[in-house]
Amino acid sequence: MIDHIGLEVSDLARSAAFYDAVFHPLGGRRIVDSPVAIAYGIHEARLWIVARDRRPGPGFGHVALTASGRPAVHAAYEGGLAHGGRDAGPPGPRHAYGPRYFAAYLLDPDGLRVEVVSGAH
């Protein structure tokens, strides 16, 4: 079980615009909003973005966010692209992960990989 994930970002405002656009269609919101950290979740802070005045390193891995269905995957993907994200795999089935697995992949403004998935469980 994961309690929370923290990502170091180089520009907090730029990354916040990206994560706001990705989380909104998933039902998430800002739980914590400070000058050096913003945390997202539904009821509790689960994903933190933190400014530490240095760029994140390459090859971090990825964060997977749960979507309520395929329309939410599409909306989060489009929202992320419109707010500084880059495509890393458009919305679609990922049969290698199961018959119901539907996901999209984005790179956030710092190049960290974000997966938005529906039907994983």
Image: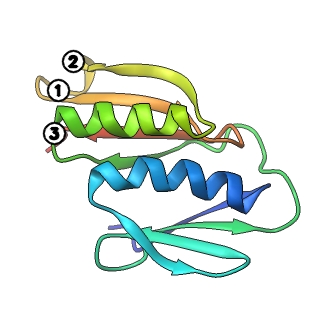
x and y percent of residue 44 in the render? 35, 79
Classify residue 4 as left or right of residue 65.
Answer: right
Label 3, residues with CA under 10 Å away: few <14, some 14-19, many ≥20: some
Label 2, residues with CA under 10 Å away: few <14, some 14-19, many ≥20: few
Three-letter amino acid code of the residue under disc 3? Gly
Helix, strand or loop at label 2? It is helix
x and y percent of residue 36 in the render? 73, 76
Q: State how far apart marks 3 and 2 are (Cα).
A: 16 Å
Q: Are marks 2 and 1 in contact (CB under 8 Å)?
A: yes
Q: Residue 102's image quarter?
A: top left
- Given the current orientation, which residue lies at the most extreme front position? 82
Q: Residue at x 37, y 69 (%)?
A: 41
Q: Residue at x 24, y 46 (%)?
A: 67
Helix, strand or loop at label 1? It is loop
Residue bearing mark 1 = 98
Three-letter amino acid code of the residue under disc 2? His
Q: Residue at x 65, y 81 (%)?
A: 34
x and y percent of residue 49 in the render? 62, 64
Classify residue 38 as left or right of residue 10.
Answer: left
Quarter containing the N terminus: bottom left
Residue bearing mark 2 = 95
Helix, strand or loop at label 3? It is loop
- Please say if 59 is above or below 93: below
| Foreground: disc 3 or disc 2 | 3
Classify residue 12 as left or right of residue 6.
Answer: right
Classify residue 92 as left or right of residue 3.
Answer: left
Q: State how far apart marks 2 and 1 are (Cα).
A: 5 Å
